[in-house]
């Protein structure tokens, strides 16, 4: 069996700065043709996006897909809500997790798995300011240690 190639189109690095990621899920995404063409060119931004569950379906809001320049009348609203494709039992599980206080569904990355476009979805808890400082301090210490070990040899 042939292994599927994955190619990351967009990553939400700000999510890892602002949230603790507890679990990750993979979801398909319902798009129009011009949106897919625009995403293939890398014209997508996940920075301020989030997911919500309504009527047993899951949607992503705030994901900006720039209009395809050759799409003319077929282009859609860049910030429209897009439906995510997941199994019903997964959506119900996420609904139970989001019901707890302080838990959000945040898109982490958008990538092609073979020919299919997938969205990596994180179940996240918000970081406080002191948590962000601790994380930054740990990263800085790791960088310093790595730099020192390289200079030693």
Image (tube, rainbow, N blue to C red):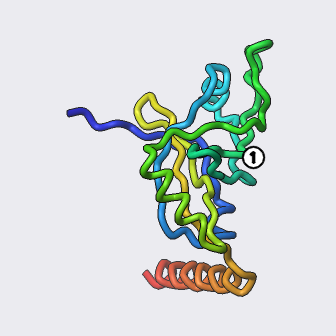
Residue 72: name its quadrant. Answer: top right
Front position in the image: 32 or 137? 32
Instruction: Give the residue displayed 71% in from the left and 51% down from the top.
Output: 49
Name of the residue lying farthest toward the front: 55
The residue at the far left in this view is 1
Q: Nearer the viewer, residue 54 or 48?
A: 54
Quadrant of the frame with the N terminus: top left
Locate residue 108 relative to residue 38 in the image: left or right: left
Q: Is residue 135 left or right of residue 67?
A: left
Determine whether the residue tagged by mark 1 lies in a helix, strand or loop.
loop
- 137 lies above or below 127: below
Looking at the picture, does residue 81 appear above or below residue 149? above
Residue 57: x, y in percent?
A: 58, 43
Q: Position of residue 52 (x, y in %)?
A: 65, 52
- Mark 1: give few (<14), some (14-19) or many (20+) Cα within 10 Å: some
Measured from the top left, where is residue 145 in percent x and y?
A: 52, 85
Mark 1, residue position: 62
Q: Quadrant of residue 48?
A: bottom right
Q: Residue at x 61, y 58 (%)?
A: 105
Q: Could you tell me which residue is drawn at 62 percent across and 57 percent down?
A: 106
What residue is shown at x 66% (from left), y 80% (from top)? 136
Compared to 76, does 90 lie above or below?
below
């Amino acid at each position: 069996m042939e292994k599927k190639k994955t190619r990351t189109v967009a990553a939400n690095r700000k999510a890892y700065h602002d949230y603790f990621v507890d679990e990750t899920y993979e979801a398909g995404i319902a798009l129009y043709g011009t949106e897919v063409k625009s995403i293939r060119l890398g014209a997508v931004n996940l920075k301020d996006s989030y997911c919500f569950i309504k009527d047993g379906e899951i949607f992503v809001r705030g994901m900006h897909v720039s209009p395809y320049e050759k799409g003319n009348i077929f282009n859609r609203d860049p910030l429209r809500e897009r439906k995510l494709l997941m199994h019903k039992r997964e959506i119900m599980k996420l609904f139970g997790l989001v019901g707890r206080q302080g838990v959000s569904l945040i898109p982490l990355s958008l990538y092609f798995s073979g020919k299919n476009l997938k969205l990596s979805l994180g179940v996240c808890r918000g970081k406080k300011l002191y948590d962000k400082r601790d994380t930054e301090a740990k990263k800085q210490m790791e960088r310093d240690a790595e730099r020192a070990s390289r200079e030693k040899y």
